[in-house]
Amino acid sequence: MSLVRRSTLLPALLASFLAASLLPPAQPAQADPRCPGMDRVAVPGALHQVAACLDDLTTAGTVASGHTDAADWAGLHSAATRNPSGVPGIQIDGYFPDDSTSNPTHGWNHDSQFVIRLPRRWNGGLVVAGAPGNRFQYANDFTISDFVLAKGYAYASTDKGNGGLDFYKDGRRPGDAIVEWYHRMTQITVAAKATVARHYGRPARRTYAAGISNGGQLVRWALENHPELYDGGVDSEGTFWPPDNRPNALVYLPVALREYPKYAATGDPEAHAAMLRAGFAPGSEFLWDFNYRVLWDGTQRRYREEIDPDFDGDLDAGVPFCQSGTPNCDADYDYYARPRSVHEAVRRASHSGRIGKPLITVQGTLDTLLPIRIHGDAYAALVRSRGMGRLHRYYRIEGASHLDIEYDAFPDRMRPLLPCMRTAFEVLESWTAPGGRQPPPSGTVPRQTSGDVANTCSLG
């Protein structure tokens, strides 16, 4: 896609969506007595949209009706997670104009797909999310959508404009694919706010951003760059791209790819020490093998290809699981030795820490994909350095990791993160309500070892 400058983005979006709102829907839905007004539902700016009246907008109903994709949210929650159900309303699926085709959902082969859900019993609020990882628009359905729909919120999510294993092929220059994620988060927020106002006859009283991992990255950026669109946000284990030479994922992942095999083979103490120096938490060693086999290699190669495609010449995202010393091997990647243009690509995707609305961050101390020292701790320090600490609460969740399926494998050593994200959302609701209640101070939350660990979490 072609990108516009950040300073001109919102006015351009507002103008285009206002113009689009004067036109009839791309595909007008048929009236349904169960969902009054469905034939008038229109998403401004959408190139294509399909509306459906559903007896249940939660995954308890949408899996069977074909209005979600369970594969898109696999692994993000514990098998013991309990979710609400029984929320009737309207679901709108569609896409905005885009020229990339990485999203195959619905057989559309079109990027910038979205989903908007409008519950029959609306509480006057809206929650907007972006997909974690390189997943698509349904990726938050179980973790976020079900939870907020049951509270009465309308819900909207974007696929971020590109996704899948080849997301880095989108865009014209290094960093464009990630920068587009921010554009699409703004786009779905503006469109969803207009859709909600048109459908319910009044604007949303509260709009929150919520996201996990790369979705949390979007929440941070949104509250930094477009706080006027939101009343607050919840960032769960968000990816941090620093605006300076602090370490980022492209610094510690090559260390992991280079040193972990030596540690796994012999217990090499020097390799172990190198892993800890890179940012991996002491005590997380039992998670290293899973992350090596499933996450580290693909993450390093693909994000390095997005930021620094010249490193491996004509290769497409390097050589999987190459050993150190192999030509063009990501295990030997040295971010700090790369040209200035590479650092500029990271800067374009970076965070400023200048949040303009309340933000709550939760991250697990055992996160082994996005080590907490490099991501959560560093971002919280940046926010404080910008003088915005009063708007930020940061809860370090002892024993949680990046994927809650890791908790299922090691329940005696860990706790899942999702319940803490959901508690954080309720804390944010209280914080941003009229006469709002101040949240508990930032800090480390001890690991819960009793009770319903998969569904409860106290932040203090």
Image: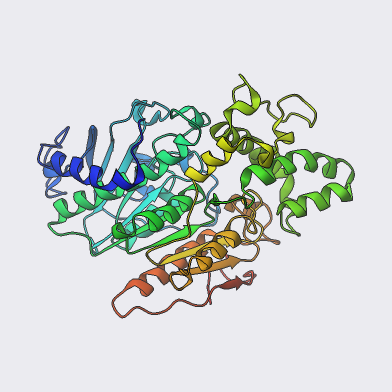
Position of residue 18 measured from the top left corner of the image (x, y, whole percent): 15, 44
Position of residue 440 measured from the top left corner of the image (x, y, whole percent): 49, 77
The quarter of the image holding the N terminus is top left
Q: Residue at x 63, y 37 (%)?
A: 300
Q: Nearer the viewer, residue 124 or 262?
A: 262
Q: Is residue 383 above or below residue 258?
A: below
Q: Which corner quadrant of the image does residue 154 belong to?
A: bottom left
Tally the numbered discs: 0
Mark yes or no: residue 160 visible: yes
Mark yes or no: residue 416 visible: no
Would residue 309 appear left or right of 146 to someone viewing this image? right
User: Tell me, what colour scheme is on the image?
Assistant: rainbow
Q: Is residue 330 above or below residue 253?
A: above
Q: Residue at x 58, y 53 (%)?
A: 404
Position of residue 138 measured from the top left corner of the image (x, y, whole percent): 40, 42
Q: Residue at x 15, y 56 (%)?
A: 200
